[in-house]
Image (tube, helix red, strand yellow):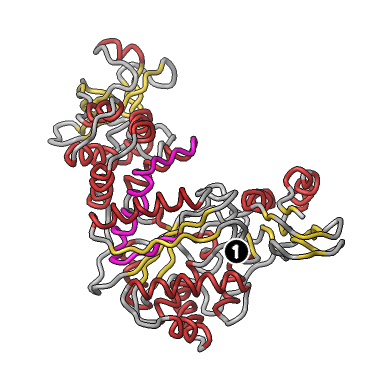
């Protein structure tokens, strides 16, 4: 059937969508969510779209194409194309198999991942795959196959060195910007560390949000390789380059309901490390109230799975279980965290952030076989070599040689209303206040923490300061402070 193309100015961010008039669809017995194959007239190849049916906006014998499909077709609006009916992809059968609690083999998982990467699955079909993995679980074999398939169906970074290091933190601790301290330390000691990180989803800042205060983080694969080969390190946004793209698409489905199937979570983390070229990976699992991993028992179970899967993948890893019961560092929010990072690298800064970064960097060097690495880590900071390396990385990524941290226009101090001893600082509530102030979109917004748990405080002591470029944000937080007060004393 020949149809005239109409561009629809909407984007899905993934699946290829075509819209047909209900009269056209009725002629060929086509129903919503079924597939069609479209191609240019007399062309050999085309591609598959998922259909929507409409009685408005699309005329009979027209085909409306969402942005992804329209740009892929590469023809002017009003041009005629050929359309034929298409069978459902084979991966649908395998998704049903998973929903029936049957184990998927390597070929079946790879077929699903290929269809995800090629936008052959609708969001609903992808959601069924994620929910099947969530409710039925993934075996070690399935997790390993899923990881390898994600890596093999995306871009990869390749370096000539035998040792490439990386790290991952399971997250949830406010502040905790250790990565931005570790990368320049490790890079200054001669090891390559290409670090791709995420942006914040529910927290006040991710590593990429914080690094973006100092330098661009959306770099191409070629630019990342250039930066790393020049400086030994980088800190970039993983979403800006097509590494493990299938995983990024699955994350968009997982996020709304906070679905984190353990096997899928492991595959997500380890696939990104393999795609970045890592051979040695340090995993930090903080546990405690208000973070993702609630108990030490849960952390140990996760640790065992990391070791099992990594061994099968040929990755050398070390898993550390750390205390995540309170924020680390003083700043919570991109600019405030960036200031903490530069301060530590200059030999000062929050002591807890400094100590944890030194500990993790030391353990990373042990993983690659360094003997007595602690003096080397301390010297990297005290000599200024790590700070110089940070400035090199910032400049190589497109930032200024001597970065200036921006500051917010307004602030408000939250003071203690009585004498007491601080017993708990809630990570989730601190992050909540920082996001209400405008973080991470507003780089200067956030919270500066001035106290720690188990410390005695006097009435009138400033416990934390809220920063924002919008006075209304601060006023809104002040009205809700009793409800979201993060400090118990």
Q: Which residue is mark 1?
A: 328
Q: Is residue 435 left or right of residue 10?
A: right
Q: Is residue 17 in view?
A: no
Q: Residue at x 77, y 47 (%)?
A: 481
Q: Position of residue 229 (x, y in %)?
A: 32, 75
Looking at the rendering, in which quadrant would you find the N terminus? top left
Q: Position of residue 345 (x, y in %)?
A: 54, 78
User: In the figure, residue 158 lies in which quadrant?
Assistant: bottom left
Q: Is residue 469 in view?
A: yes
Q: Is residue 268 magenta?
A: yes
Q: Position of residue 110 (x, y in %)?
A: 21, 41
Q: Is residue 72 magenta?
A: no
Q: Which residues are magenta?
A: 257-284
Looking at the rendering, in which quadrant would you find the C terminus? bottom right
Q: Is residue 21 left or right of residue 417?
A: left
Q: Is residue 146 left or right of residue 330?
A: left
User: In the figure, residue 458 lies in which quadrant?
Assistant: bottom right
Badge 1, how many Cα within 10 Å: few under 14, some, many 20+?
A: many
């Amino acid at each position: 059937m020949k149809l005239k193309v109409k561009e629809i100015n909407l984007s899905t961010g993934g699946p290829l969508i075509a819209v047909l008039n209900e009269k056209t669809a009725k002629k060929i017995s086509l129903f919503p969510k079924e597939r069609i194959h479209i191609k240019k007239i007399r062309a050999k190849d085309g591609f598959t779209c998922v259909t929507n049916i409409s009685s408005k906006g699309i005329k009979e014998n027209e085909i409306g194409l969402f942005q992804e499909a329209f740009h892929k077709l590469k023809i002017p609006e009003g041009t005629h194309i050929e359309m034929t009916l298409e069978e459902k992809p084979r991966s649908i059968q395998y998704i049903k198999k998973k929903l029936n609690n049957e184990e998927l083999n390597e070929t079946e998982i790879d077929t699903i991942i290929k269809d995800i990467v090629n936008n052959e699955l609708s969001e609903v079909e992808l959601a069924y795959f994620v929910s099947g993995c969530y409710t039925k679980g993934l075996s070690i074999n399935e997790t390993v196959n899923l990881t390898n398939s994600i890596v093999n169906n995306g871009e990869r970074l390749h370096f000539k060195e035998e040792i490439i290091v990386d790290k991952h933190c399971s997250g949830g601790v406010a502040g905790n910007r250790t990565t931005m301290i570790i990368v320049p330390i490790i890079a200054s000691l001669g090891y390559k560390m290409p670090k791709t990180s995420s942006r914040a989803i529910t927290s006040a800042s991710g590593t990429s949000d914080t690094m973006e205060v100092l330098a661009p983080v959306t770099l191409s694969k070629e630019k990342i390789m250039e930066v790393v080969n020049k400086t030994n390190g980088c800190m970039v946004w993983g979403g800006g380059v097509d590494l493990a793209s299938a995983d990024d698409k699955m994350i968009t489905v997982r996020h709304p309901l906070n679905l984190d199937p353990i096997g899928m979570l492991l595959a997500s983390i380890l696939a990104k490390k393999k795609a970045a070229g890592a051979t040695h990976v340090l995993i930090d699992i903080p546990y405690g109230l208000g973070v993702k991993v609630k108990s030490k028992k849960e952390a140990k179970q996760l640790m065992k799975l990391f070791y099992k899967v990594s061994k099968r993948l040929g990755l050398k890893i070390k898993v550390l279980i750390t205390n995540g019961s309170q924020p680390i560092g003083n700043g919570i929010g991109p600019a405030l965290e960036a200031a903490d990072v530069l301060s530590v690298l200059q030999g000062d800064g929050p002591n807890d952030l400094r100590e944890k970064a030194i500990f993790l960097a030391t353990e990373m060097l042990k993983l690659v076989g360094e003997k007595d690495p602690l003096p080397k880590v301390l010297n990297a900071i005290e000599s200024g070599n790590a700070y110089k390396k940070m400035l090199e990385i910032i400049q190589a990524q497109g930032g200024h040689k001597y970065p200036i941290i921006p500051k917010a226009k307004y602030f408000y101090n939250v003071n203690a209303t009585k004498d007491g001893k601080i017993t708990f600082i809630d990570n989730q509530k601190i992050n909540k206040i920082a996001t209400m102030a405008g973080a991470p979109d507003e780089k200067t917004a956030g919270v500066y923490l001035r106290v720690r748990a188990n410390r005695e405080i006097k009435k009138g002591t400033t416990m934390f300061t809220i920063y924002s470029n919008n006075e209304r944000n601060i006023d809104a937080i002040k009205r809700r402070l009793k409800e979201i007060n993060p400090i118990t004393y």
